Image (cartoon, rainbow, N blue to C red):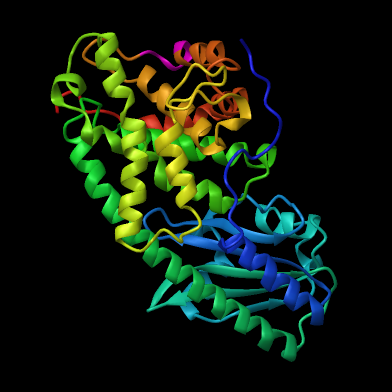
Amino acid sequence: MTVMLSNKRGFADNQDGLSAQLKHLHEVAALNFSFLSRIAVALYDSSTDMVRTFVYSGKTCGLNHYQAKLSECYSLQELAHSHGTRVEQNLSVFADSKHRHAYEIFEAGYRSSYTVPMLWQGQLLGFVFFNADRIDAFSPRCLSELDVIAQFLTLLIATQQSNARMLLATLRSARDMTHSRDPETAYHLERMSRYARLIALHTANEFGVDDDFVEHVYLFSPLHDLGKISIPDSVLLKPGKLTDAEFEVMKGHTLTGAEMVDKLMGNFGLSHLHHISVLRNIVRHHHEALDGSGYPDALQGRDIPLEARIVAVADVFDALTSKRPYKEAWDNDRAFLTLREMAGSKLDPFCVEALIDQRAEVEEIQRVFRENPFG
């Protein structure tokens, strides 16, 4: 049975999220400054030197899922060091630029810009970009009001990251207890979470999701098997094939994991966070199948949350290409062929093709997080 999917998100929206707040701020600012056509927030990851678009409000353009190294963005690097701001009143100077960021800005119809670094307790969180559809748009009064919006967004981001760190620290502690018992390879979670981000990023336009969603899929995907902490060793560590009764016990990790998420969020007062639904859906539904043969809820097609469909492809691919006590690692060609055979019945075909189309990035992930055969 092959299930066709429509180009719908399939994940739970929450209007209290940062994306909705940014859109509201944009609407308010546009009442006085109608030329303000886009506001975007990009986050900075110091561990990789990467600047990534996180949330945005405005028309779709090539920058909505953009990422680049800060060291390769001279003007942003200057702002990061100086803690200053940058106004470009006429972007036509970038019309023939070879730098993708400058080219995409001009091609999207933006004609002036204002950039503000987000700084919190001496650390660079990222940047806020304000784009206008005409030259000489940013008067001193306008810049003053946009500074207030930038500072408010900095506060929201800092608060969200603080909550996220608490959330992840709590859940990773539980996850690490599980993973220490699970015979999966050491770098499985590192690889599969990055595969999940690749899939989410390259299906974002197809499914109409933003970069906020992409990053939370990456953050939460390593927690997909959280509920295995409840599985007895006799089942979890069994080297051979599970009996039907043992498999029923193993299947229970999805429900147990979702219950753990709810309890931990309640205990730490984090249930209000808008991305908790993404985490819960990953934990509960990553073993669903498009044809309804999966578990725990036998969901079909787009009734399976998008984040769970993404993680399913990432998890299956890494399992196929990793050595296990009962099998050798498959090469990528064989694994890709199997994914395509499962597409439409078990796995989301858009997610499968998104992974296969990024073969060079997949192989780079495998190179960086390669297992050490000597332990």
Write down the quadrant of residue 75 in the picture.
bottom right
Image spot of residue 320 (x, y percent): 38, 17
Residue sitting at 30 percent across and 53 percent down?
264
Q: Residue furthest bottom?
A: 141
Would residue 373 appear left or right of 361 to someone viewing this image? left
Image spot of residue 126 (x, y percent): 50, 67
Would residue 151 appear left or right of 176 to someone viewing this image? right
Would residue 18 appear left or right of 113 to someone viewing this image? left
Q: Classify 66 as above or below 296.
A: below
Would residue 166 appear left or right of 196 to someone viewing this image? left
Predominant secondary structure in magenta?
A: helix
The N terminus lies in quadrant: top right
Image spot of residue 220 (x, y percent): 40, 45
**Residue 111 visible to the viewer:** yes
Image spot of residue 284 (x, y percent): 42, 35
Residue 139 versus residue 279: which sits nearer the camera?
Answer: 279
**Residue 368 visible to the viewer:** no
Q: Classify 132 as above or below 206.
A: below
* Magenta-span inclusion, residue 271: no
Tag count in the figure? 0
Residue sitting at 38 percent across and 25 percent down?
318
Residue sitting at 30 percent across and 38 percent down?
226
| Magenta range | 330-334
Q: Classify 59 as above or below 204.
A: below
Residue sitting at 61 percent across and 22 percent down?
349
The C terminus lies in quadrant: top left
